[in-house]
Amino acid sequence: MPPAEQTWSDAIDEITRAQRIGLVGHVRPDGDALGSIIALALAARNAGKDAVASFGEPFIAGDEFRFLDQSVLVPPSAFPADLDLAIVCDTGVLDRVGSVAPAIEGAHRTLVIDHHVTPGTVGDVRLVDPGAAATAQLVFELLHRLEWEITKPVAEALYVGLVTDTGRFQYSSTTPAVHRMAADLLAAGVEPAPIGQVLYEEAPFGYFAVVAAVLGRARLETDAGLVWSVLRRDDLDAADVPWEAADPLIDLLRLAREAGVACLLKEMRPGVVKGSLRSRGIVDVAAIAATFGGGGHRNAAGFTTELSSDDTIAKIMDLLG
């Protein structure tokens, strides 16, 4: 169910009353998390608020987001511990924000803005809409209700959240409202061509070697309708490529037409595996991710596990039947 009108009113009241505001995204923020916190922090500053944004270590924004106005970002060590209001974007689980969690707990009030269904209980007010295509869509609506100006830098950050979480407007979450929002952002000054080039048409040359390694390990489990592969730390180190640059790999795996589900396992460090899941629509991969303590959407979800890659795939295949 979408948020009730009272929830919108409560969120607006919290923001209006607060002077010192801190925006937080989940660790290793994607375009939606990063775009949402930057957009809201920039708009808050323009409205006269004392606002900063951050996320837990590693405090590294992907190079593909370099065109965004990142002046509001501060490292976790500089994130205030006595905020009037902490706003958590794109997650409702405190464990997902990493080292900034104590500052959130120390804030006088907490607002969650998210489009994921999660078991999180953080937040005095929870503005959650699983029907929204992106958290940025909720931030966009919130800015309109606050009557805050959407400048070009704010619009660019919102556009990044929208375009990345809708898969360039190709996912089933893309609605007429999504396109109307995109039109408004373009009217505010967003230029899709250069943004699309940086987001989707650039990669370091070393990325080719990483792609070759991951696709070379790809396996098709015909009976389960699953295609999967593993990304190893050594793949990235040998090619001098950061973890953030490997995020698009799951979109290459999901091209296999014989599979309804794609899974990429990233061996982050010994004993820790991060999984990304994609579905063509029949299988609810959010339900699969939930068995590992993760979450997401029906067609796109993720999780972190201490199981080995082989044991993780075995469990997923069992769940697929």
Image (cartoon, grey):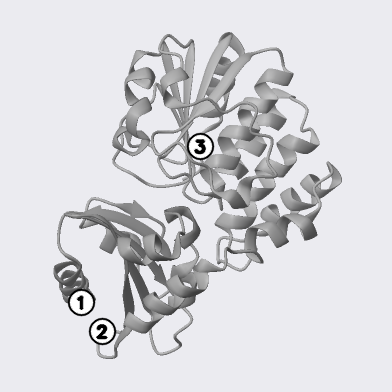
Res. 167 image quadrant = bottom right
Compared with 147, 168 (above or below) is below
Tell me how far mark 3 sits from mark 1, CA to CA: 36 Å
The answer to which of 143 and 222 lies nearer the viewer is: 222
Tags 1 and 2 touching, CB below 8 Å: yes
Foreground label between 3 and 1: 1
Q: CA distance from mark 2 to mark 3?
A: 37 Å
| Residue indicated by mark 3 | 3
Identify residue type, mark 2: Ala
Quick check: 82 left or right of 168? Answer: left
Q: Is residue 91 left or right of residue 197?
A: left
Choose top left, top right, bottom left or bottom right for residue 157: top right
- Dot 2 falls on a residue whose secondary structure is loop
The x and y percentages for residue 54 are 49, 29
Residue drawn at (71%, 60%), measured in percent from left and top? 196
- Closest to the camera, between mark 2 and mark 3, is 2
Question: How many numbered marks does the figure carry?
Answer: 3
Q: Quadrant of the C terminus?
A: bottom left
**Helix, strand or loop status at disc 1:** helix
> At label 3, which amino acid type do we have?
Pro
Which is nearer the N-term, disc 3 or disc 1?
A: 3
Of the numbered discs 2 and 3, the one sitting upstream in the chain is 3
Question: At which x and y percent is residue 150?
Answer: 76, 33
Question: Does residue 70 lie above or below 223 as drawn?
Answer: above
Q: Which residue is mark 1?
A: 317
| Res 224 label | 2
At 68% from the left and 28% from the top, the residue drawn is 145
